[in-house]
Image (cartoon, rainbow, N blue to C red):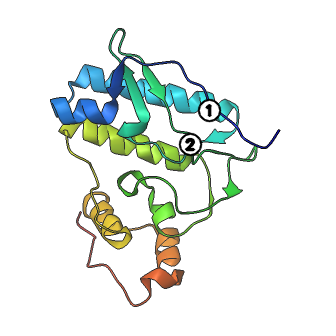
Amino acid sequence: EGDDYYIVMEYVAGGSLGDEIKKRGRIPQDEALHITRCIACALNAAAQFEIIHRDIKPENLLIGLQNYSLKLCDFGFARTVNSKGRSELTDYVATRWYRAPELLLGDTNYGTAVDIWAIGCIMGELTDGQPLFPGESEIDQLYVIQKIKGPLTSAQNEMFLRNPRFLGLKFPDMTRP
């Protein structure tokens, strides 16, 4: 009668990837590669339907006990994007630690690259057992990212300078991450 939609997914006997990382810490390299490949395949399948997930994180990845299969879940932030892969969307998506710099900087014209960024963050977490970029706020998140990856790009720096949330703030010299 109304506009209610329901997503029904198959049951996955196991738990989330987040639970697995908490329990085991570092994941062996061959398993980490398998998991990363599975995440990439899931996102590729979503991209075939022009869907961007926007909340890729270990807690939204279910791991099957039997065959170590992976299922992507929680499509609450998911949206369709135009065929060029970019669309005007909200910047407040994804759990902060897995949020791409453009999202942290307030960009609303982004594409599937924000999901790819999250895969990289998860890869780092799989191999280390700890979140790769554990920022405590948006500005701290940007600082932590730069400590490891180096300074913002010139386009990102422009976004930073134009964003009223960051007015009067600046980062220390990040030329040597």
Point 29% across, 27% down: residue: 32
Q: Residues within 10 Å of mark 1 (few under 14, many from 20)?
A: some
Q: Horizontal and vertical percent for residue 151?
A: 35, 68
Farthest right residue in view:
1
Which residue is tagged 1? 46
Q: Mark 2: which secondary structure? A: loop
Which residue is tagged 2? 53
Point 50% across, 62% down: residue: 102
Q: Looking at the image, which is closer to me, 70 or 109? A: 70
Is 83 placed left or right of 35 in the picture? right
Q: Mark 1: which secondary structure? A: helix
Q: Looking at the image, which is closer to me, 45 or 157? A: 45
Point 53% across, 69% down: residue: 106
Q: Horizontal and vertical percent for residue 65?
A: 32, 14
Q: Where is residue 28, by image quadrant?
A: top left
Farthest front residue in view:
1
Q: Is residue 15 above or below residue 146?
A: above
Q: Looking at the image, which is closer to me, 161 or 57? A: 57
Q: Amino acid at mark 1?
A: Ala
Mark 1 in CB contact with mark 2 (< 8 angstroms): yes
Is 128 placed left or right of 150 in the picture? left
Is 132 placed left or right of 67 in the picture? left
Q: Where is residue 146, by image quadrant?
A: bottom left
Q: Horizontal and vertical percent for residue 26?
A: 18, 32
